[in-house]
Image (cartoon, rainbow, N blue to C red):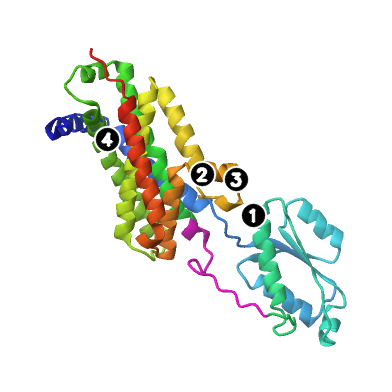
Amino acid sequence: MKLSRMLAFSRKEALEIVRDPITVWIALFMPLVILFLFGYALSFDVKDAPLIIVDHDKSAASRALSDQFLNTSYFRLAGAFEDERIAEHALMQGKARAVLSIPPDFSRRLARGEEAPVEFLVDGTYASTAAIVSAYGRAIIYAFPKGTLQLPVQPEVRVWYNPQLRSRDFIVPGLFAVILMAFPPLLTALAVSREKELGTIAQIYASPLTKPEFIVGKLMPYAAIAALQLAIVLAAGFLWFRVPMHGSLALLVGLGLIYVLCTVSIGLLVSTLVRTQVAAMLVTLIVTLMPSFLFSGFIYPIFTMPPFFQSYSARIPTMYFVNISRGIVMRGAGLPELWVNVAVLTLYTVVVLTLATVLLKKRIA
C-alpha cells in the first residue's frame, strides 16, 4: 500500500464531494433534524396526565388527597364528577388517563386509624405510559397522609445516574449511536454505487490502485464527514438539550471515532455487494437504520426481548455504542467498565473492512 496513491485517490473523492454541496449540507443538516425530532418528540416522561376525580367523601381529607395529585406536575384536573359511570365513560373516550375514586367513608376510616382504600383507575391503552402513571399514583397514595400507612418494611428508594428520571437524558445519548449508524453508511454506499452506475469505476479498475488502497482512499473523506457529524450531534446534545455529562468527553469522542469508522465501513461493504444506488439505499436502510431503532437497546431494553432477538442484537454494532454512549454520559463509566463493548466494536470494524476489501471485485478494464 502506497500512501501517496491513497491520498491522491482520497483527494479526488473529496473534490467530488465538494462539487455536490447539496449532499454535503444534507449530510450535516439531517443528523440535527433527526436529533431534534426525536429529542423533543420521543419522551417517556409523563406530565399533565388528565385526571378525573370522583370524590364521594367531600371532606378535608379527601380534598387533601386530591390536592396531593394536582399539586404535582404529573397530573392535571380533567373533571370532577359524582357518578362513577361518567368518569369511566370519559376514560373510555380517551379524555382522561386516570380516575381517582374516593369512597364516602374515607375520612372516617382515617380518623379511626383503619385502612382507607381508594380506587385508582388507569388507561392501559399505552402500556408504558400506564405503568408510569400507575407508579406515580401509587406513590402519592402511599405517602398520604404521612405516617398513616404502616408497612412492615419502610422503603427508601434512590435512583442513580438519572435521579430526575428525565427521558431526554436517556434518549439523546442513544440517538448519538442511531444517527451515526443512519447517515455515514448511506453516503458511502451511494457514492460507490453511483460510480458503478455511471461507469466511472472502470477507470479505477484500470488504475494501479490495489484493493486496500481503494478501500482506504474511499473511506477517508466519508470518515471525515462522519466525524464532523459526530461533533455536531455531540455539541447539540450537550449544549442545546443540556444533557449532563458525567464521564470523559475525550473518551466518548475517541470511541465515537471508532464507531463512525465502523459505520462507514458498513457502507463500503454494502456498496461492494450491489450495483445500483436504489439497491444500495434499500439494503443500507435495512441493515443499519431499522435494526438500530428496534434492536440496539435505544428504545426497548434488550433484556426484555426473546432470546433470539437478544442474540440478534449482539450482532448489531449500534448496541455496543449505545452502551458506550450511555455508560460514559449517564454513569461516568470508563474503559475498565466498557472494554468489552470497545473490543467488540473494534473487532467488528476490522472484520467489516476486511470483508469489504476481499469482496471488492477489481477488474482490469
Tell me, for residue 307, which label it has, or none.
3
Query: Which x, y percent locates residue 346?
Result: 34, 46
Q: Nearer the viewer, mark 3 or mark 4?
A: 3
State the residue position of label 1: 128
State the residue position of label 2: 313
Q: Is residue 157 above or below residue 135?
A: below
Query: Which x, y percent locates residue 40?
Result: 49, 53
Q: Is the stretch drawn in magenta largely helix, strand or loop?
A: loop
Q: Are marks 3 and 4 in contact (CB under 8 Å)?
A: no
Would you say residue 315 is visible in this rendering? Answer: yes
Q: Are marks 2 and 1 in contact (CB under 8 Å)?
A: no
| Residue 155 among magenta residues | yes
Query: Which x, y percent locates residue 232?
Result: 33, 49
Q: Nearer the viewer, mark 2 or mark 3?
A: 3
Between the residue at mark 4 and the residue at mark 2, the CA separation in whole angstroms equals 26 Å
Tell me, for residue 219, which label it has, or none.
4
Among the two numbered marks 4 and 2 on one chain, the one whose residue lies closer to the N terminus: 4
Q: Are marks 1 and 3 in contact (CB under 8 Å)?
A: no
Give the left or right position of residue 327, taking residue 69 as reference: left
Residue at image x 84%, y 83%? 114
Query: Which x, y percent locates residue 137?
Result: 70, 68
Between the residue at mark 2 and the residue at mark 3, the CA separation in whole angstroms equals 10 Å
Q: Nearer the viewer, mark 2 or mark 1?
A: 2
Q: For numbered disc 3, what is the local secondary structure?
A: helix
Q: Nearer the viewer, mark 1 or mark 4?
A: 4
Q: Residue furthest top?
A: 365
Q: Amino acid at mark 2?
A: Ser
Residue segment shown in magenta: 154-170
Q: Residue furthest bottom?
A: 112
Tell me, for residue 228, which label it has, or none.
none
**Image quadrant of residue 273?**
top left
Q: Amino acid at mark 1?
A: Ser
